[in-house]
Image (spheres, rainbow, N blue to C red):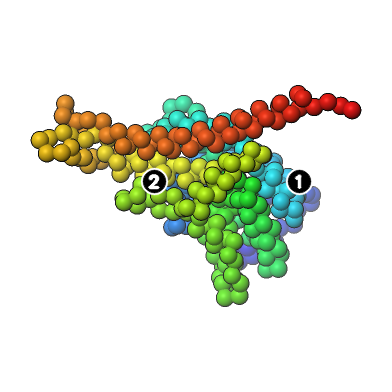
Amino acid sequence: MLEFRGSRWTFSVPNDGLLRDIGRALWAILQNEPSRDARAPSLLKRVVPHHPSCSLLYYKELEDLQKILHFPEQLALSMTETEHKLFSQVSAIAYIRYTTCDLTGSEVLHQNDIQDLLQRFNEVRCWVTHLVVSQPTDEDRRGVLSCLLRAAQTCWNLGNFHGAAQLVAGLRSEKLRPFWASLAEKEDIPVLDFLFSVLEYDVTPKSHDAINPHYTAALQRALAIKQCKVVPFFGVILRRLRGILTQCPSLAVVRETPAEVISEPSCENFSSPLGVGGLINMEKLRQVQLVVDEIQACQNHATEQQGHLNSKLNNFEFP
């Protein structure tokens, strides 16, 4: 049964294969529809351009995850394995290159692994929304919601903040507004509200590197655990870099009065027409380096974890 804007259609298909094809086609349409959520981060509103060969890159994996939906902890562990490998493949410079190209409207000439993170984020987000809206009754929707919330909380506890953000984004979809309206006066969901408030923040002119303190504390706790597979939320990294590049001027000018920082006329050019009197704004470089150090700390943690595991395997002795 398909329901859209108050109308319902019932499909009768001769076999499961054709039903799967219909579901795949509907999912592809759903995935490539831009988000209408005004509170969604601007960088995450961009949907990877549709291409038949890559539009459903993670379809098979998500189809398998759906089979263990009622085991949310196992679902979260499986997602963490995939996303930990994906994050480890993205270099720190890729985040900077993607952000600068996004600000200037330039096309990334070389393959950028950030697009893989965006691709996965969009597919999982749409998958979560589809899981809820495809249920035939409100009771079934509540059951799926309960499983997804437990999976999101487990991802957060495991240090997979990227996975938690994907699940929360799917549950916050505009397409689920009628469902949330039916629950608004009956139930309070503190887990969802907490995760959304922690993973969603606005960069302000006064504090371009502001991060929710709960997220920072959780990230540091995860890095302190050797066995934890830490996957930071890439949306926080991109928004932080975007704030630094747009709000911090690249050059400062020296005059007879103390050094004065000159604001840039446009974020499209990352240099100011100040001539030979301009000095590089080291504070801007320092802020960018702090973000890079955080990315590298997470990736070094993954490398050390793998080395520790290999050492244990090499020293293991059979009885």
Frontmost residue, 127 versus 76: 76
The earlier-in-sequence mark between 1 and 2 is 1
Does residue 172 lie above or below 276 as drawn?
below
Frontmost residue, 3 versus 177: 177
Classed neighbour count for the residue bearing mark 1: other residues with Cα under 10 Å, few (<14), some (14–19), many (≥20) = few
User: Helix, strand, or loop for circle 2?
Assistant: loop
Rendered residue at 62%/41% (across/down): 225
Outermost residue toward the left in this view: 256
User: Helix, strand, or loop for circle 1?
Assistant: helix
The quarter of the picture where the C terminus appears is: top right
- For the residues marked 1 and 2, what is the alpha-carbon distance in whole angstroms? 50 Å
76 with respect to 211 (left or right): right
Does residue 28 lie above or below 175 as drawn?
above
62 with respect to 313 (left or right): left
Rendered residue at 46%/34% (across/down): 293
262 with respect to 30 (left or right): left
Note whether residue 19 is visible. no
The quarter of the picture where the N terminus appears is: bottom right
319 with respect to 35 (left or right): right
Percent coordinates x, y for residue 66 in the rendering = 72, 50
- Residue ID for mark 1: 17
Percent coordinates x, y for residue 274 in the rendering = 17, 32
Note whether residue 295 is visible. yes
Q: What is the count of numbered marks? A: 2
Frontmost residue, 152 versus 128: 152
Outermost residue toward the right in this view: 319
Rendered residue at 16%/26% (across/down): 276
Percent coordinates x, y for residue 108 in the rendering = 43, 31
Q: Please, what is the three-letter code of the amino acid marked with disc 2? A: Asp
Classed neighbour count for the residue bearing mark 2: other residues with Cα under 10 Å, few (<14), some (14–19), many (≥20) = many
- Residue ID for mark 2: 209
Q: Quadrant of residue 141?
A: bottom right
